[in-house]
Image (cartoon, helix red, strand yellow):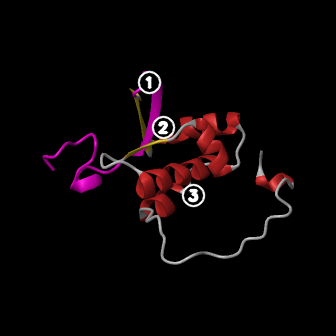
């Protein structure tokens, strides 16, 4: 459900807190914001938040469509299209693995430039850069 449709008319933003941050790379704003659709940029920011604030050391974070829907306020179909757009644009990556209950878990990560991922490397470039 979109927040623009009046569902959250009672919401009043109280302001930002200090100093809890998610440091988003500048490329998200300078290179991607003018090119991605609004929905895709919201999805990118939700994934960036999960990866950069809560993510694992390999640069991925477990996040599913239901959580992206909750974080962005977008409809399921909009999230599906936006994730596809981000994947096609090459700004996110997806890995799938099984959790302890043998359920398939989809994890999204930001696609880092070689040598600039977590711990100075990117998931695709390994430790040699």
Return the x and y of residue 127 as percentages of the image width and height.
16, 46
Q: Is mark 1 on a helix, strand or loop?
A: loop
Q: Earlier in the sequence, mark 1 or mark 2?
A: 2
Packing grade of label 1 (10 A; few <14, some 14-19, many >=20) is few
Q: Is residue 4 above or below residue 69?
A: below
Please report the bounds of the magenta region as a residue range: 100-129
Q: Which residue matches tag 1?
A: 101
Return the x and y of residue 109 as percentages of the image width and height.
41, 44
Q: Do the residues labelled 1 and 2 touch (CB within 8 Å)?
A: no
CA distance separating discs 1 and 2:
27 Å
Q: What element carries label 2?
A: helix
- Farthest left residue in view: 128
Q: Which residue matches tag 3?
A: 34
* Quadrant housing residue 85: top right
Give the prevailing secondary structure in the magenta stretch.
loop
Q: In this view, does 96 lie above or below 55?
A: above
Q: Residue at x 46, y 64 (%)?
A: 22
CA distance separating discs 3 and 2:
17 Å
Q: Which of marks 3 and 2 is nearer the N terminus?
A: 3
Viewer-side label of 1, 2:
1
Q: Which residue matches tag 2?
A: 87
Q: Earlier in the sequence, mark 3 or mark 1?
A: 3
């Amino acid at each position: 459900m979109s927040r623009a449709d009046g569902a959250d008319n009672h919401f009043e933003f109280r302001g930002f807190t200090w100093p809890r941050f998610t440091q988003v790379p500048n490329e998200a704003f300078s290179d991607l914001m003018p090119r991605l659709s609004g929905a895709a940029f919201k999805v990118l920011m939700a994934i960036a938040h999960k990866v950069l604030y809560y993510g694992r050391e390999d640069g991925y974070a477990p996040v599913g469509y239901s959580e992206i829907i909750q974080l962005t306020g977008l409809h399921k179909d909009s999230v599906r299209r936006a994730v596809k757009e981000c994947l096609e644009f090459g700004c996110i990556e997806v890995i799938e693995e099984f959790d302890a209950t043998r359920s398939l878990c989809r994890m999204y990560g930001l696609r880092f430039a070689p040598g600039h991922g977590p711990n100075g490397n990117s998931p695709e470039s390994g430790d040699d850069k």
